[in-house]
Image (cartoon, rainbow, N blue to C red):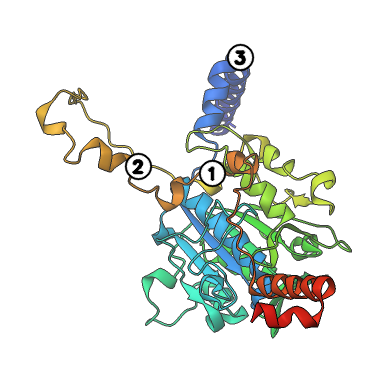
Amino acid sequence: MAAAVPGASRARAAAALLLLLCCCGAALPGGLQDQAEQFFRSGHTNNWAVLVCTSRFWFNYRHVANTLSVYRSVKRLGIPDSHIVLMLADDMACNPRNPKPATVFSHKNMELNVYGDDVEVDYRSYEVTVENFLRVLTGRIPPSTPRSKRLLSDDRSNILIYMTGHGGNGFLKFQDSEEITNVELADAFEQMWQKRRYNELLFIIDTCQGASMYERFYSPNIMALASSQVGEDSLSHQPDLGIGVHLMDRYTFYVLEFLEEIHPASQTNMNDLFQVCPKSLCVSTPGHRTDLFQRDPQNVLITDFFGSVRKVEITAERLSLDRDVPGLESKFPEEELATEPLKYAEQLPVAQIIHQKPKQKDWHPPGGFILGLWALIIMVFFKTYGIKHMKHVF
């Protein structure tokens, strides 16, 4: 009996210590508790994005514009090309039907070119297949595959996966020749979790009956958004008469407009993203799923997925930022700097473009118009003077 007393006393002491810690935690001021929650909010150290357009052919122009718009937004918020896997099933910029080659526009005023000069497409044309997509996610790719075509994520990676194309109840078509099902996609995400390839994952899909694609998910730390519920179509937006097709889908258009207001230090959370496209705007009913996600969406920043973790180096040295220092003078005159074109990710925001008036285009009469005008003049002449006066003309 005497030997059991020290063990019992240690157990009581541990219980008392645990109770004391709980009481202290409950007594913490609200500010300190908020700071602690802010510090432990995510735990990721790097960001990746996998952006997939699964449609070919000119009438699916909007799907390429959808993907490139998201690509532009994540690059603007800090995710570099080395951490983006871009898959485009068709090259709309070089399509013979494109009236403005080397451009892809996402707005009917043709002010926002989402193709740009520094777009790095990793998988194009017939490389965009279900097999290649699943291999990218799971990491089961040949050793000869270049680094730019690999998803080199780890257990500290937050991954954004965006997909757009034509789909149905439980499937998404790839190039009208094959399909990926919601079961295959769910199994791929489970393999990623088992292989410790992500910390948290955000899945966004813009397609008809998009919510059916996340119904079978069962892996932890996945948040999913879709443009439409089961039985609903995801509708297009922004028709353009000059190009002859719709330029974007409604859901992605309003998501892009929302992201234009986000900056790297923004405190906007995921609950705000859930509300960007109500049924009054999208016509379809967007959906989201958060039951597999461990954190409250209200505490998840948009930049946890659309932005990039920035490395900070702490230094004790004092740096002078005075413009009068001779070594900091610009090498170029102000006039040249003023006329330098904007970079791809710094173009005019969509929020300003939407409220702009369309540019007036120069009007040129078609060839048939001139011919018809001459025919009208000759008819009026015959009706007025008759054929007997023709000898006075010639």
Of the two numbered discs 2 and 3 in the rendering, the one whose residue sits closer to the viewer? 2
Q: How far apart in space, not on screen, are marks 2 and 1 (Cα)?
A: 14 Å
**Front one among 374 and 58:** 374
Label 2: few (<14), some (14–19) or many (≥20) C-alpha neighbours in 10 Å: few
Tell me where residue 20 appears, x and y as whole percent.
Answer: 58, 19
Question: What mark, if any, has residue 304 been given in the picture?
Answer: 1
- Type of amino acid at the residue the image marks with label 3: Ala
**Front one among 386 and 292:** 386
Tell me where residue 204 appears, x and y as whole percent.
Answer: 66, 57
Q: Is residue 65 above or below residue 323?
A: below
Name which residue lies at 58% across and 76% down.
89
Name which residue lies at 84% across and 52% down.
283
Tell me where residue 293 appears, x and y as whole percent.
Answer: 67, 48
Q: How far apart in space, not on screen, are marks 1 and 3 (Cα)?
A: 30 Å
Q: Is residue 286 above or below residue 95?
A: above
Sooner in the amino-acid sequence: mark 2 or mark 3 = 3
Furthest residue to the left? 326
Q: Is residue 224 visible?
A: no
Question: Mark 2 = which residue?
Answer: 311
